[in-house]
């Protein structure tokens, strides 16, 4: 809905979306920081030439700045990996991108039945007793596998497992090099949704572990706390808990122990296990140690071998991972094939819901194939004639 009134909040959202501070945008557009702040808080509105400059700098259509959201959205806690080394501007940009993606996904839900959120109710005490915590997390990993009928073997398609149970997996902005992954809870129209964003530059085993790590946050931790208010030690504790559950979930104790005990101290054997379990050699060595398959001396010996071989940075059998979104691509392909909407209709539907963006940005956010939303050659409303 177009209010024909400049919306200062939209300017702020666009700036955050592009990962720009007021200072950097001020310098780029030659507009004072004070004036930009006044634009954003709505105390003054920009002249047409200034708005055009801002629109170009932020790469948002001018209509965007005159549009209101069609509905409210509630964003819960966002759990970032690499939080301690990532700037707040970079984190805010990724969080804002996922917020917009949630709104787009909500529009898709008007036309497609997606898998509903299906995760078990987990009680996690967060005890500081190391042995009790380890056993509690092992039990939760078993509970998750049983709830989703995953058995005790390797999980072939973890992304499919998450998406088929209502957790949306998408790709991070390739420019966000300091962020490995993050998860975010969003509520739209009182419907709770969880999103997991993974770096598109990750290899297969790293991407899988990151997905399992973010799943651990979803089932273990509160989605109403302020992450920035946590102490360094509290944040590290949550990361440790998530890593422990990710490891226990991907490498179930009994079956992985049976495998690794054949040659627990032979590094080349872990290369073989990596092909089966699709988990990094380093993660498997750590898991073998936590399960007492190897003692501390053997653990340290294997790590020295890893370093000597240069496998701490690049392991054997590493494969690239394609993070394109099969879920949202499939939804749009279905909508277009069944002629429910054309690409142009879809972009109009987004605009009616307050999402005014360039098609290329929407494609990147949704992880679509390039050109999916190209409607320049749309002939659906052209009368087709035939020769006599």
Image: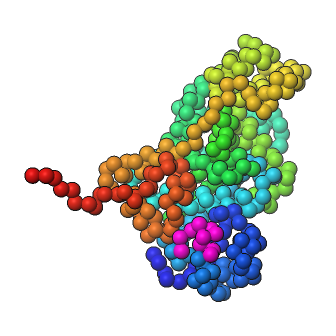
Indicate whether residue 386 is drawn in magenta: no
Residue at 71% of width from left, 66% of height from top? 20
Q: In which quarter of the image is residue 304?
A: top right
Residue closest to the eye, 15 or 125: 15
In this view of the protein, can residue 118 be seen by the observer? Answer: no
Task: Read off the magenta span.
Answer: 53-62
Residue closest to the eye, 385 or 109: 385
| Picture coordinates of residue 267, whole percent (x, y) | 78, 18
Question: From what the image shows, is residue 177 above or below residue 88?
Answer: above
**Taking 224 as reference, is 119 left or right?**
left
| Picture coordinates of residue 192, whole percent (x, y) | 55, 56
Residue at 60% of width from left, 70% of height from top? 56
Question: From what the image shows, is residue 266 above or below residue 29?
Answer: above
Residue closest to the eye, 253 or 88: 88
Q: Going by the picture, which residue comes out furthest to the right? A: 297
Instruction: State the predominant SS element of the stretch in magenta.
Output: helix
Residue at 85% of width from left, 53% of height from top? 232
Residue closest to the eye, 17 or 32: 32
Q: In which quarter of the image is residue 230?
A: bottom right
| Picture coordinates of residue 112, whole percent (x, y) | 40, 52
In this view of the protein, can residue 36 be seen by the observer? Answer: yes
């Amino acid at each position: 809905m177009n209010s024909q009134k400049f919306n200062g909040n939209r300017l702020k959202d666009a700036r955050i979306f592009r990962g720009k501070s007021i200072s950097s945008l001020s310098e780029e557009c030659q507009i004072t920081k004070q004036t930009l702040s006044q634009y954003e808080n709505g105390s003054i509105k920009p002249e047409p030439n200034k708005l055009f400059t801002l629109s170009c700098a932020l790469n948002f259509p001018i209509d965007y700045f005159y549009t209101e959201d069609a509905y409210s959205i509630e964003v819960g806690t966002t759990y970032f990996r690499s939080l301690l080394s990532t700037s707040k501007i970079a984190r805010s940009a990724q969080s804002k991108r996922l917020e917009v993606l949630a709104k787009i996904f909500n529009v898709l839900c008007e036309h497609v039945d997606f898998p509903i959120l299906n995760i078990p109710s987990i009680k996690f005490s967060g005890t500081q007793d190391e042995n009790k915590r380890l056993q509690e997390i092992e039990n939760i990993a078993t509970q998750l596998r049983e709830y989703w009928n995953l058995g005790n073997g390797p999980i072939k398609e973890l992304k499919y497992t998450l998406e088929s149970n209502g957790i949306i997996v998408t790709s991070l902005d390739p420019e966000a090099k300091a962020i490995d992954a993050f998860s975010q809870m969003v509520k739209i129209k009182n419907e709770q949704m969880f999103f997991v964003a993974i770096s598109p530059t990750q290899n297969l085993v790293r991407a899988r572990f990151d997905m399992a790590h973010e799943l651990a946050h979803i089932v273990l931790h509160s989605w109403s706390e302020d992450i920035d208010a946590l102490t360094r030690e509290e944040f590290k504790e949550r990361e440790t808990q998530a890593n422990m559950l990710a490891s226990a979930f991907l490498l179930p104790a009994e079956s992985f122990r049976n495998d690794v005990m054949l040659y627990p101290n032979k590094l080349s054997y872990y290369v073989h296990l990596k092909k089966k379990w699709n988990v990094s050699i380093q993660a498997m060595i750590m898991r073998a140690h936590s399960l007492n398959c190897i003692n501390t001396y053997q653990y340290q010996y294997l790590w020295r071998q890893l370093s000597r071989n240069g496998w701490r940075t690049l392991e054997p059998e590493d494969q690239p991972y394609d993070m394109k979104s099969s879920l949202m691509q499939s939804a749009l392909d279905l909508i277009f094939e069944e002629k429910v909407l054309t690409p142009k209709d879809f972009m109009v539907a987004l605009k009616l819901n307050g999402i005014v963006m360039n098609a290329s940005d929407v494609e990147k956010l949704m992880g679509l194939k390039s050109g999916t939303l190209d409607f320049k050659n749309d002939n659906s409303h052209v009368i087709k004639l035939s020769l006599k």
